[in-house]
Amino acid sequence: MILRPRREDVLSIGYYLGRIIIALGLVMLLPALFALIIGEKNPAMDFLIAVEISLVLGLTLAQICRTDKDLNWMQGMVVVSLSWIVAALLGALPFYLSGHWNSYLDACFDAMSGFATTGLILVQDLDHLSLTHNLWRHLIMFIGGQGIVIVALSFFIRGLSGAFTMYVGEGRDERILPNVIQTSRFIWLVSLVYFILGVVSLGITGMLLGLKPFSAFFQGACIFMAAFDIGGFTPHSQNILYYHSFAFELITVMIMIVGALNFKLHYCLWMGRRTEIFKNIETRGLFISIIVLFVIVGASLGGLQIYPEAAMLFRKGFYQLISAHTGTGFQTIYPAQFFGEWNQLAIIGVIFAMGLGGAVCSTTGAIKMLRLGIIYKALLEDVKRIILPEKAVIMQKYHHIKDMLLDDRQVRSALLITLSYLAIYIFGACAGVYFGYPVLNSLFESTSAAANVGLSCGITNAGMPAALKLIYILQMWAGRLEFMSIFTLIGFFIAAIRGK
């Protein structure tokens, strides 16, 4: 029998959702203040209007649903899944008010793309977008990479013992430190330290390329937020190709790889356990996958002779592969070049890279290497059970921060998430074919959206069908949250309708 949600459930969900909305409204004060400082008056008004709407909505919801009860697992998961939808709806307000998006749906698409660290865009005339709106595009990517709930737990919501439920709901299931609030703050500490190092490196490089100091460091900050949080937004319509700099591309490759690593692994490295990067099943799987896929992509492109020099093959082939595998979405080629110059085998290699992704508890999306490692170990265990005598005791181990025994719960969870990703990749591809796009192009764009990558072969544009925009929004949302909180939200609504 399905139990109908109680009034207390609705109050708890509404109250904490309201507090997260308030937190989002306060964050929007940052670009508003930035706009006032640099003298962009119209963008400042756009953000002040969005701040007012967010604060009124959040305060009203928190007041109506005021409760002193903590969140249980179901409530926490529902709060997380709803908070990302609300964040996209409210975060889109300053975009739409700017006039650079054709519709509010297009603005919501880019807001979800930013929060989900995807990088697909529908913005018009990006090269003339205000600095303030560009800052917001990259700031929501920085927030989304760490997690909307992580931001709220770190700075705005205190004393919530049920915080771990929301932490898990955002696709993270590892505690770096004993307390979730401490874990959230460590994630921000890592991000801010790398932020300083990355912005300095990119800013100096930009100045050497001829940019003025303010522009160099502003663009460096934007590029870092997108690279470390595995996004893909840039301040220019040509993406990373705009800079035409090998040094700039090399720096972003390093930032992308760092961003694709597990935050718990970062903690081990900070604590001096540097050998962990070679022992960990995730990092070993990631580097093996990169090597294998680059052999496929490199050999395919080498046979075409479109990049005859090794340096050019790196800048065009390897860069796209790393961008795909880490889920970043930076491009040093135009979208049309994927299917205009590359052959199908190279494109399939990039699709595999996008679909596999980086590490769990990182800012990357997709299936992730730990799950693939667990499935591989489970397969080995089953093979051993067949080969070895029936009385043999088989214990399969793997190393992830520490030596761990493989159990059925881990395998079941890894398979469920993997199958969910594969299903949503195929669903989006079928939708693309339905709307008249070629099969491989549709699979490429669908995988990019659902795996939160942002590479595009040209399907994503303001003129594509509205229904396909909605499908990609749902894919970005579900892929970023890794399904469990989405399943809980669906179950919550089913229980509300059919429960007793």
Image (cartoon, rainbow, N blue to C red):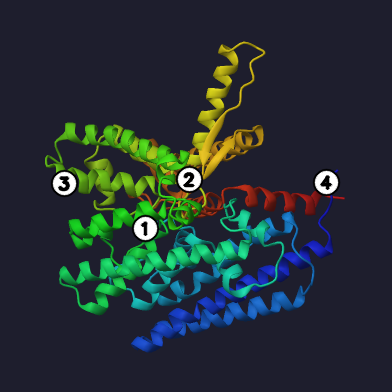
Residue 186 in the image: x percent, y percent? 52, 64
Which is nearer the N-term, disc 2 or disc 4?
A: 4
Nearer the camera: disc 2 or disc 4: 2
Which kind of residue does numbered mark 2 sit on? Ala
In this picture, is 173 found above or below 14?
Answer: above
Along the horizontal axis of the image, is 341 left or right of 259? left
Question: Alpha-carbon distance for marks 2 and 4?
Answer: 32 Å
Q: Count neighbours of disc 3 (C-alpha within 10 A) and say few if under 14, some if 14 to 19, many if 20 or more.
A: some
Label 3 secondary element: helix
Q: Name the residue carrying label 1.
A: 232
Residue sitting nearer the eye, 230 or 134? 230
Q: Are marks 3 and 1 in contact (CB under 8 Å)?
A: no
In the picture, residue 84 is in which quadrant? Answer: bottom right
Which kind of residue does numbered mark 4 sit on? Ile
Question: Alpha-carbon distance for marks 2 and 3?
Answer: 28 Å
Q: Count neighbours of disc 1 (C-alpha within 10 A) and say few if under 14, some if 14 to 19, many if 20 or more.
A: many
Q: Name the residue carrying label 4.
A: 2
In the picture, residue 160 is in which quadrant? Answer: bottom right
Q: Name the residue carrying label 2.
A: 366
Residue 169 in the image: x percent, y percent? 62, 54
Label 4 secondary element: loop
Which kind of residue does numbered mark 3 sit on? Met
